[in-house]
């Protein structure tokens, strides 16, 4: 078994992602590993009925990047404070599952939450976690939110 020293935790800042962060922190404590919180986002763009497009300009892009950086920094500080585990942050623009799979190449383990959608919601929304499990080269642990927490989220 490959030693687990670097854990990637994709986050969308949801309650389900927080459950995965907590699991990753516990594993990091047990293995003496570091944790990297990773957020993937897309920039707003629209195609109008006449075929014209709108793509976010520099001002919008800068604001979004700043918001992501701030949210990741807060999450990392909180995680380090609660666990004593070193927590790094990364973000990337692009399709979430593709960027997570690409980032996972530098890690020993991915720990990520799953929303647990089924049926039509799963069909239309897809599952980032499912795609990561299928395509990542390292092990992927998916963590589902406990039922009692999910009913309040």
Image: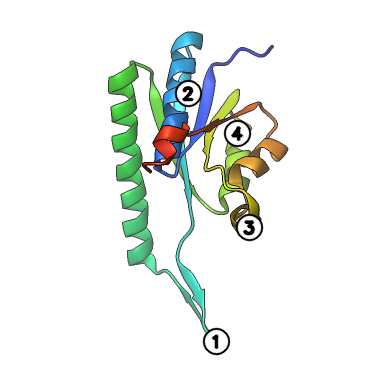
Disc 1 residue crowd, few under 14, some 14–19, many 20+, Cα 10 Å: few
Q: Which residue is drawn at 70% across and 31% down?
A: 137
Residue 120 disc label: 3
Is 115 left, or right, of 81 in this rendering?
A: right
Residue 100 disc label: none
Disc 3 residue crowd, few under 14, some 14–19, many 20+, Cα 10 Å: few
Q: Which of marks 1 and 4 is nearer the N terminus?
A: 1
Q: State yes or no: discs 3 and 4 in contact (Cβ < 8 Å).
A: no
Image spot of residue 81 (x, y percent):
27, 21
Give SS at disc 4: helix
In-front residue for pair 55/141: 141
Real-space CA distance between mark 3 and mark 4, rounded to the nearest whole angstrom: 29 Å
In-front residue for pair 122/1: 122
Real-space CA distance between mark 1 and mark 4, rounded to the nearest whole angstrom: 38 Å
Foreground: disc 2 or disc 3: 3
Q: Which of marks 2 and 4 is nearer the N terminus?
A: 2
Image spot of residue 102 (x, y percent):
62, 40
Quarter of image, res 85: top left
- Residue at mark 1: 49
Q: Which residue is drawn at 47% across and 23% down?
A: 23
Real-space CA distance between mark 1 and mark 2, rounded to the nearest whole angstrom: 45 Å
Disc 2 residue crowd, few under 14, some 14–19, many 20+, Cα 10 Å: many
Q: Where 43 sits versus 50, above or below?
A: above
Quarter of image, res 77: top left
Q: Earlier in the sequence, mark 1 or mark 2?
A: 2
């Amino acid at each position: 078994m490959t030693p687990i020293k670097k854990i990637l935790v994709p986050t969308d800042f949801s309650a389900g992602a927080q459950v995965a962060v907590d699991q990753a922190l516990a594993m990091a404590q047990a293995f003496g590993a570091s944790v990297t919180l990773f957020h993937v986002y897309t920039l707003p763009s629209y195609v109008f009925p006449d075929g014209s497009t709108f793509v976010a300009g520099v001002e919008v892009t800068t604001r979004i990047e700043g918001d992501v950086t701030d949210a990741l920094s807060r999450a990392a500080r909180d995680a380090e404070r609660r666990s004593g585990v070193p927590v790094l942050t990364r973000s990337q623009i692009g399709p979430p599952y593709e960027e997570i799979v690409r980032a996972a190449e530098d890690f020993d383990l991915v720990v990520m939450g799953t929303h647990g959608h089924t049926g039509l919601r799963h069909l239309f929304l897809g599952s980032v976690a499912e795609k990561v499990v299928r395509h990542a080269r390292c092990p992927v642990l998916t963590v589902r939110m406990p039922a009692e927490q999910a009913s309040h989220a």
